[in-house]
Amino acid sequence: MKIQILTFLLLFQTSLLIAQTSLEQLNLENGKFEVGFRNYTTADSTRNYSRIYDYTNQKVPRPISVSVWYPASLRGNEKQISVLDYMETLKEEEEWENLPNDQILNWFYYQNTAANQNHLKETTAAFANAEFEGGKFPVIIYAPSYQAPSIENFALCEYLASHGYLVISSPSRGTENRWLEGGTEKDMETQARDIEFLTQELNKVPSADLDQIATMGFSFGGLSNVLSQIRNDNIKAIVSLDGSIKYQYETLKKSTFFDLNKVDVPFIHFSQKDIPKEVLEADKIDAALNTNFEFYDSLSFSDAYQLKFHNLTHSQFSTLGVLFEQRDPRQDKSDPEIMESYKWLAVYTLNFLDGYLKDDSNGLEFIQKQPSENGIKKELISLKYKEKEVEAFSFQDFNDLARKQNYEDLLGFYESIKSEYPSLSLPEGDLNTLGLQLLFNPKTSQKGINILLFATNLYPTSANLFDSLAEAYLFVGNQEMAVKNFRKSLELYPQNQNAINRLNQLNQ
């Protein structure tokens, strides 16, 4: 007997041809770190859950299977993981813990063919329960596709870990039980909460750099991870592996947390090839899905990248899809073409993360070049890229923030703001008016003086500002500083009659 899941979007269906691939043929160039892998089960006590195949009314805290890939330090006795070891995690995640291994392919999602049996025997790059390498490493939280296991993209996760990242993932499962509802708003919220749960799990990992976190989501996971970023400022970048944010943006809009202005971190979307006309017509798919991408088009405050992989269909954005998934003869490319593209997918993901989480200029340069400039054949990948819009920063914005810091260290504050908003303009007259407004309120007189001192630093040749600063000191009873600044005003503008009169009065 084989468990069937609901078909989730005709867009993502495949059929009929068996893949002829292997991990060795993928030829991912791992980095300098050995890779450790750990899988364990914990529970979210804030949510109740039913194990449907136990056929009981009993509720339990919602179980969460956690998979972690990380830079590792080997001692020589660690076990190198096989693909079968990874697939064994499905038994717990699908709630068939006691299923014999020889039934895994029969029972779950992939054809029990000779080729797929051979995949199970392949050795991966990871070592079970190896020691964590010392130091801190940026974190990637991986959100799987609809109903998919935590290990569905294990080769990509190993690749990133070998290059100095810690990757953590949990399976895609429903709120109250194993099954999702069909890609609903509730399903999205559930997976977003799982991502947030994993951020808490990271506190248990000493090598996790909690200041550098990105989310990476495939298919439905590439919708939920956007929601999680909207409401979590600690997420610094978003990777979308043909994410449903392209196909189900309306679902995100239904969330009470939806606020596009909060999507203000770098975003990269890897898109499947154009779906052929015969497939669109036969499967009743809207042809607009090939071209429309409202979310990407609407982004203003993010560096945003869109790469179309002309040799990949949807399922091939995951390791399990490349290795085990049946091919669709109507549109799928050859296996060598698919594996070559998956390798470039890994390379682009790494460079994007290096650029934005590790401040690596080489990574940024790579992803911003046209693919042909990186030695990639034009027919493989096409790129769209847009820089974030520089948000206007007004005098009012400056004053609001200056007020919050009590009008102290204004010059340093201005320099930090100016570096982010080079077009910032603080007109001399506005600074003068603000300083005097604050001065004549006895509760804020010193703040007014601070503004005028800052203004004279910004406009050191302004006789009017030095005259106002002198009046400010006179107002608070500091005659010595008043005389000094009236004299400075006269140096700049000898015809300043107010300064002349004030100095005469003070001398008398």
Image: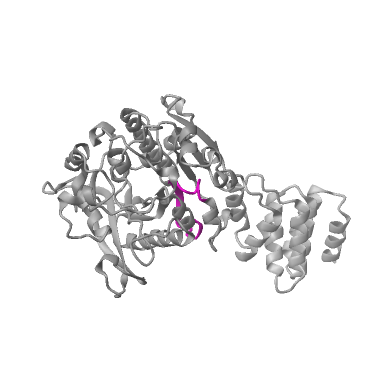
Give residue 181's quadrant in the image: bottom left
Q: Percent position (x, y) of residue 366?
A: 44, 33
Give residue 346's quadrant in the image: top left
Residue at left 23%, top 52%? 107
Magenta run includes residue 241: yes
As drawn, 58 above or below 123: below
Identify the residue at the far front of this view. 282
Looking at the image, what colour scheme do you see?
A: one colour
In the rendered view, does 297 fall on the left or right side of 306? right
Residue 208 visible in the current orientation: yes
Residue at left 18%, top 51%? 103
As drawn, 408 above or below 381: below
Magenta run includes residue 444: no
Identify the residue at the far left of this view. 77
In the rendered view, does 389 fall on the left or right side of 444? left
Q: Percent position (x, y) of residue 503?
A: 83, 61
In the rendered view, does 237 fall on the left or right side of 126? right
Q: Give the magenta part as a residue range.
A: 230-248
As drawn, 270 above or below 147: above
Q: Percent position (x, y) of residue 109?
A: 29, 48
Residue 163 visible in the current orientation: no
Q: Between residues 291 and 475, which one lies in front from this camera angle?
A: 291
As drawn, 380 above or below 121: above
Q: Between residues 15 and 257, which one lies in front from this camera angle?
A: 15
Number of callouts in the render?
A: 0
Q: Between residues 466 and 209, which one lies in front from this camera angle?
A: 209
Residue at left 57%, top 48%? 301
Q: Percent position (x, y) of residue 298?
A: 59, 47
Locate the C terminus and report the quarter of the image it occupies: bottom right
